[in-house]
Amino acid sequence: MSVDAGACGVMLPAGWQANEGTLARPLAISGHGLHTGRRVNVRILPVEAAASAGERHGIVFRRLHKGQALGTVAADPSLRRGQPLCTMLRANDGLGVRTVEHLLASLLACEIDHAIVELDAEEVPILDGSAQPWIDAIKACGRTALPRPKRFLRVLKTVSVADGEGAARREMRVEPADDYALSVHNNDLKGFGDMEWHGRLTPRAFADEIASSRSYGQIKWAVPAIVVGYLRGWPILRGARMSCTAAIVGNRVVGGLRQPDEFVRHRVLDLVGDLALAGAPLLGRVTARRPTHEMNYRLLAAVLGTPGAYEWVEAHA
């Protein structure tokens, strides 16, 4: 990634703070993993001193075992590893953290640019399946502004990725824009029709329109996946419960939907979380048709891997 020293300046997009930030005090929360099913305790710690000193700290995960540190894994796209139904980070020494997308989206939307996330198991807790508990907990802790301008990744030319053919085709594109805009289309569930969400991504928009949307899935597909996972030693959906997912039976959701278009809003949540691996919000317009974690990463990798496709910029009010 580019270093701050080469960052250009732009006008601050509406809705964002002028300075980077960290938590005002530590955050503690517990839950279980969606895929491992394991209980996990999380603490998110401020890093004001390191970030203020000029070091780019970003978001770093610290794995613990019985109170002792096993090692760290940075939220960096180069450490992303493909896993079914989630985003995983794995350091070069093999230490991993899975299902990071909801937390990363929440930290980005709450403008917590620098933090240490301590956890005593491999998987970030799923909580109620949405980002809302993270948003509420982060806001309750408060934010401390740091003496460095807000950084954005500005898209300079259009980059696209695609996979599949016909009705199964998945397409994603990002193009230059003056703010962070998203247009997401999803039709991956028969019986629920096409769903779309379009809008400008700001901290307020994420909290009001996206954060409460839950992970979802068909029970008839989840049960076989869990069985196959156990047989092959894969941790997949072992912690799935109706309390942490929008569970689908036939053409209905057990307990109902939080919004009529909750499924596409959750696709937006995952997309924001996966793109947050860049280390900053985008200045670009993302258009996505039937996005997945894998496609989200492919788009980010394509941007970062295309010469002249982006630059780091510092925003000024």
Image (cartoon, grey):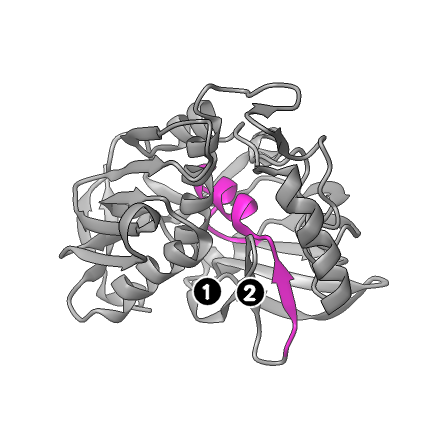
Q: Residue furthest right?
A: 66
Q: At which x and y percent is residue 15?
A: 31, 30
Extent of the magenta region:
94-115
Mark 2: secondary structure = strand
Q: The C terminus is located in which quarter?
A: top left
Determine the residue positioned at 60% across, 24% down.
253
Check disc 1 and report the residue beneath it: 76
Please report whichever mark, 2 or 1, sits nearer to the chain's N-terminal start.
1
Q: Amino acid at mark 2?
A: Leu
The reply to whether callout 2 and callout 1 are in contact (CB within 8 Å) is yes
Q: Residue 89 — which label? A: 2
- Vertical relation: 203 (above or below) 290: above
The image quadrant that residue 208 belongs to is top left
Q: Residue 91 — which label? A: none
Q: Amino acid at mark 1?
A: Asp
Q: Residues within 10 Å of mark 2 (few under 14, many from 20)?
A: many
Depth check, front residue: 128 or 46:
128
